Amino acid sequence: MSSLMPLLIAVDGRSGAGKTTLALELAALLREHHSVTVFHLEDIYPGWDGLDDGIARYVERVLLPLRSGRPARWNAWDWEEGRDGPERTTATAEIVLLEGVGSAAAAARVHLDAVIWVEADAEVRHRTAIGRDGETYAPFWQRWADQESRWLAGDDPREAADVVVQGHLNAPSPRSVRLALTALPACAVLLAPERAGRRGLTLDCERIDADPEPAALFRALYAGSAASAWLDSSDAAGAPEGTGAEPGRNRFSIMADAGGAFGQQAIHRDGITEISAGAVTTRIREPFFRWLDDVWGRRAVRVPEGLACEFGLGWLGYLGYELKRETGGNSSPPAADALPDSALIFAGRAVVIDHAEGALFLLTLTDGRPDAEREAWLAQARRAVAAPGPAPGPVPASAPLPVPSFAGRDTREEYLAKIRRAQAEIADGNTYEVCLTTSLSAVVEQFDPLQAYLRLRSVSPAPFAHYLRFPGFAVASTSPERFLRLTSDGAMRAEPIKGTRGRSSDGTEDAALLEDLRTSTKDRAENIMIVDLLRNDLSHHAVPGSVTVSRLCDVETYATVHQMVSTIDARLRPGSARAGVVASAFPAGSMTGAPKISTMAILDGLEQVPRGPYSGAAGYFSLTGATDLAVVIRTLVLREDDGGTHLTLGVGGAITADSDPEDEWNEVRTKARGVLSALGADFPAASD
């Protein structure tokens, strides 16, 4: 007869944190589909001074037999007699929950499939423990707590935990913990029935014929949200005739936050994705794109009838450039103040504005159960849409922003030297094109990130502008460049930009600048190199023969620049992983150069610092299976700490064998102008 190999899950935390209640309620839920056994460590501790010995007994007599598929036989401690009592047996089952202080100790973790750590405030823990066990426990509370402290001083089960529950911050929901367990790779197969339940959701869509001022609406709904996203077609008023812009790219704006019953926040750093939902945080220790494919790679809902936008709720945020470590690049040296490699929110409710139709859509997820918070949000959104708004145009500043004084990471001479080094790599045959970047930075007190973004969108409206807010930092972008679009039915599109000229207020001079870009053989060569790179990227997942270049080296005009843009289209091959498409094309070739892998290594040596969100991608991953991502350029990154707000603006350009270093430096200045002028700031004189 074959042994049953159980799924071993520890529920650990200090005394009084709420472990026992959570374990028992979780066991009741899991028994809907599985056989479940619960073991309590308090039954095996040998007395009030027995934490260390109890952990050793637990590992030897309980964990090791269960791990090998055999029943565990152990002696319960007789607390009245102060000695071992009769032998007991913990039977094997599909799932064994091991609850108690030390259940996830270092000696135990090597045998466990998952660790749940329950966190709670010391005062609350004391009150809970005494209330549960009575005054007989009171004389021993400190004695036992000191043992816990000594053990934890040399061990860190919380940091190693797969699921962290804030036990008394909010009521620990066993349903939320069960949902968190379904996301863990070690639990995925056995908890397949529970995972299937994650997909039993319905997307509701309510249309309102209205054309609210977007900035005022975002402020009304999301100004107080700790984590929110605004994918903003800030040039939706329409570009002047003859600007070359593709129709439809600026049709939709999306606003959402991480609130509501389904709201989540996902932060990825160094191979670990932390997903927070209320009191529960889940840690997924696997590559980011593998996690992304798991949570997004299959169509979960259909686009509602009447909604032309492909966004049907899902994940919104950014993928930082350092995710290149998963797509053929190397890891950059860590920075103490580095932002996450990726930051996303899951929106279970959102607003979609259709600028072309003058309509607004309220999207919400439902599992069929009553949801008072959902109804309250819908009512709030309807009021915000109906409220009289300001006249069309930029929202007046609530308070003047201080003018930042930027400093450059590289001086002019240092950047020119890097250009020459890049050209030496080209001459040696190591690369054809190097998309070199640098950055400007400043520290400002009391700097409102949303107000800064409203300034940017007013001065430099763009089809792929975005404002992303997370606890402690924000990303404010007026990007004109699409990285990648993948529709629910498998249409793929990339639209790289290579080639830039600054605008002039003089009409004749501006027309001459546009014509200079249109006829530039150097800029055309740069653009075509990236087109070839992206054709190759998309071909990995495309139906053979479907990769086409529908637009080559066209010129588009924006508020502060003219840009050379191409369009590559393809059709997704059936069975291909959707997250794999994003990974194959990431980072954008227009921000690396060609060939991509070897050029990223050259860039690591030239730049020597992480790029962060800059030159990564930002947008959405919809439950419909669609994604639309922008390249993170023309972007201000704002990071808050005790010293104020740290502002960073990344800028750069493509270096080829024909590049003139002085011209490339001037292009850096041109690209920085839109963001700097919006803030009333100047290009740092010390960099010239």
Image: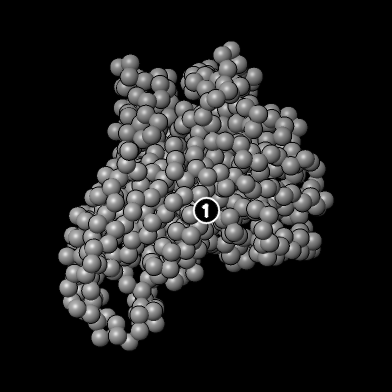
Q: Secondary structure at mark 1?
A: loop
Q: Which quarter of the figure has residue 164?
A: bottom left
Where is the C terminus found, in terms of image quarters? top left
Query: Would residue 540 appear left or right of 210 to someone viewing this image?
Result: left
In the rendered picture of this protein, how many numbered marks are placed on residues? 1
Along the line of sight, the residue nearer the viewer: 231 or 377: 377
Residue 340 at least partly seen: no
Where is the N terminus found, in terms of image quarters? top left
- Report which residue position mark 1 lands on: 32
Query: Would residue 310 appear left or right of 478 to someone viewing this image?
Result: right
Q: Is residue 672 above or below residue 181?
A: above
Amino acid type, callout 1: Glu
Query: Would residue 629 appear left or right of 135 to someone viewing this image?
Result: right
Q: Could you tell me residue 555's position as x and y percent?
A: 63, 26
Residue at position x 21%, y 56% in the image? 61
Along the line of sight, the residue nearer the viewer: 466 or 47: 47
